[in-house]
Amino acid sequence: MQLKELIEGCRRLDPQAQRELYDQYRRKLWATCLRYVREPLDADDIFQEAFLRIFRQIHTLKDELALDAWVRKIVVRTAINSYKAQQKYWQQELADTSLHLSRNEEEELIDRLSNDQLLQLIQQLPDAYRMVFNLYEIDGFSHAEIGELLGISEPTSRANLSRSKAWLRNEAVKQKIYFE
């Protein structure tokens, strides 16, 4: 199916078109979900909720060429909503870190990590740090946008990003991941 036909089929609730769209985006979007949570089962929940939203809201898509960005935005927002819902039930203490590396050393350390190693570390980040790290470093949101999405101040977003990077450095050194 051509992209336009695929979208139109989804708008008509055509199961074949919906299945094709699902199959086309399944791996990429599930991987995005996994970056925002610790457990694959939680990623499954976010993924399923996101696809329900995609199918319910596909009629609002104005430019079919923007489909990739549009579905990814829905997945990220679904992950944020899940985070906010869970945040009501627990409070997590965010520890400061003590390892200090220069910006070049930090970048070199992170560059040595494989994608799987980096994902493993990101999943271990304290939740508030993980959300800010993903939104800023991977999904390209500004600190102002992150603050608005998460209900935190812009300086808090900046501080959480800095702390997340420090945490990642410490864990990489502690676990000697970058030597593998």
Image: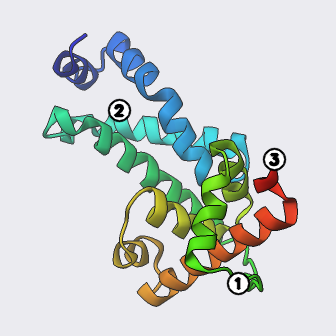
Q: Rounded to the nearest whole Å, what is the CA distance between mark 1 and mark 2?
A: 46 Å
Q: Position of residue 141 (x, y in %)?
A: 37, 65
Instruction: Decide: few, some or many residues near mark 2? Use Cα within 10 Å; few <14, some 14-19, many ≥20.
Output: some
Q: Position of residue 46 (x, y in %)?
A: 56, 45
Residue at image position (52%, 60%) is: 134
* Marked residue nearer the N-terminal end (3 or 2): 2
Residue nearer the viewer, 153 or 50: 153
Mark on residue 100? 1
Instruction: Decide: few, some or many residues near mark 1? Use Cα within 10 Å; few <14, some 14-19, many ≥20.
Output: few
The residue lying furthest to the left in this view is 62
What residue is disc 3 on? 180
SS for tag 1? Answer: loop
What residue is disc 2 on? 55
- Of the residues shown, which amino acid type is indicated by label 3? Glu
Q: Position of residue 49 (x, y in %)?
A: 50, 41
SS for tag 2? Answer: helix
